[in-house]
Amino acid sequence: MYPASFEYLAPTTLDDAIAHLDEHGDEGKVLAGGQSLIPLMKLRFAAPTALIDINRVGDLGDAIVSGSGGLVIGALVRHKDCERSEHLRGRYAALGRAAPQISDPIVRNHGTVCGSLAHADPQGDWGSVLLAAGAEVAVRGPGGASRTISIDDLLAGPFMTTLEPNEIITEVHVPDPGPRASGTYLKLERKIGDFATVGVAVQVSLSNGSVGRAGIALTGVGPTNMRARAAEEALVGRAPDENAIKDAARLAAEAAQPRDDVRGTAEFKRSVVRVYTERGLRQAVAEAQAGQEGG
Ligand SMILES: Cc1cc2nc3c(=O)[nH]c(=O)nc-3n(C[C@H](O)[C@H](O)[C@H](O)COP(=O)(O)OP(=O)(O)OC[C@H]3O[C@@H](n4cnc5c(N)ncnc54)[C@H](O)[C@@H]3O)c2cc1C
């Protein structure tokens, strides 16, 4: 099916892009990689009257920048850039490991990290990885207004965010998890390129042999990508031994809200959350203890 007709706008500055969004209100949509928006328009689930293409906006970044405070991922960074980035290794390995698990090369060549977050698909992978990492987004609105929103506060429900219709995500900030840190993303899919049946993102920072910070987030088992907070809290301050890991995995499975669907039963998905949380934590802890650079 063809999309309903729309006006196509291709601004070259962020201010112009926001002005177009402001003018069109709920009827205007940002176009980034188009990998979620265009299929929705073709199916007529979405019919914006104006598309504001941000790909020519010079003041939006297309690079991953690593600094002393952490990483900055620009609004035009594609999944493929994350797959190849030398910055997404070691303490940031969870991001580098998630990227190649997203769909196929065509989607990864076009789709953006920020577009995934704005789309807020509960089966999207970036939401979980960035929740576990404790990331936040920088957002710009009309009149130069800017704010930052934690990923926890951004994801409001299935395909819903707390963004205003006239706001654009300009970048993602990933805090530096410290030198003794690692993480991973484990995804069960029915076949290569599928959305997650279940995904588990883990991020662990060690401090004096104990867990200083833990991030655990789940894909496909709730109305949004969701933090398993009780599981995280069960790890903090403890030695990351087998008992602590098993306790956290049990709590992560309890936190999941899976439903029966074509990808599997709720019981099966809950069990996968437990097993993947255990596996992910074992790997992240071992790498953090070794100070090893993840591949
Ligand atoms: C066949 C297929 C398989 C897929 N499989 C997976 C998968 O396994 N895992 C996964 O995570 N994803 C998957 N996706 C989704 C893909 O990752 C998309 O790239 C991503 O969800 C959206 O990014 P985009 O840049 O293409 O955004 P677009 O499609 O351009 O936009 C998506 C939404 O976000 C808004 N938006 C985009 N950028 C911004 C911004 N900077 N600020 C504010 N709003 C913005 C748009 O207005 C729109 O509402 C798949 C997509 C397809 C087509």
Image (tube, rainbow, N blue to C red):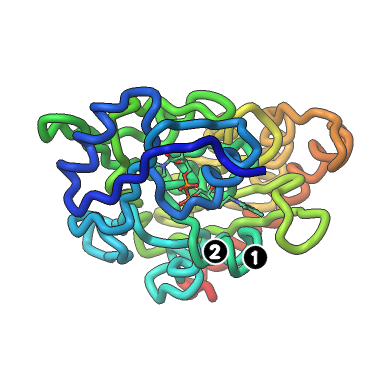
What residue is at 49 percent from the left and 40 percent from the top?
236
The quadrant in which residue 72 appears is bottom left
Vertical arrangement, residue 203 with respect to residue 293, above or below? above
Q: Label 2 amino acid?
A: Arg
Helix, strand, or loop for circle 1?
A: loop
Report, in whole angstroms, how far the alpha carbon at label 1 lies from the one at label 2: 6 Å
Vertical arrangement, residue 163 with respect to residue 123, above or below? above
What residue is at 14 percent from the left and 31 percent from the top?
145
Q: Is residue 21 visible?
A: yes
Q: Position of residue 156 (x, y in %)?
A: 49, 24
Q: Is residue 239 visible?
A: no
Vertical arrangement, residue 139 with respect to residue 170, above or below? above
Task: Look at the numbered disc 2 and say if its residue's Cβ is closer than 8 Å to ligand 1.
Answer: yes
What residue is at 67 percent from the left and 56 percent from the top?
186
Q: Residue furthest front?
A: 5
Q: Position of residue 184 (x, y in %)?
A: 58, 59
Quadrant including the C terminus: bottom right
Task: Look at the numbered disc 1 and say if its residue's Cβ is closer than 8 Å to ligand 1.
Answer: yes
Q: Position of residue 180 (x, y in %)?
A: 42, 63
**Which residue does the numbered mark 2 point to in the structure image?**
108
> Mark on residue 172?
none
Q: Nearer the viewer, residue 125 or 202?
A: 125
Q: Position of residue 256 (x, y in %)?
A: 70, 31
Assess whether mark 2 and mark 1 are in contact (beta carbons under 8 angstroms). yes
Q: Nearer the viewer, residue 128 or 119?
A: 119
> Mark on residue 104?
1
The quadrant in which residue 1 appears is top right
**Is the residue marked by circle 2 packed among few (<14), some (14-19), or many (20+) residues within 10 Å?**
many
Q: Label 1 amino acid?
A: Asp
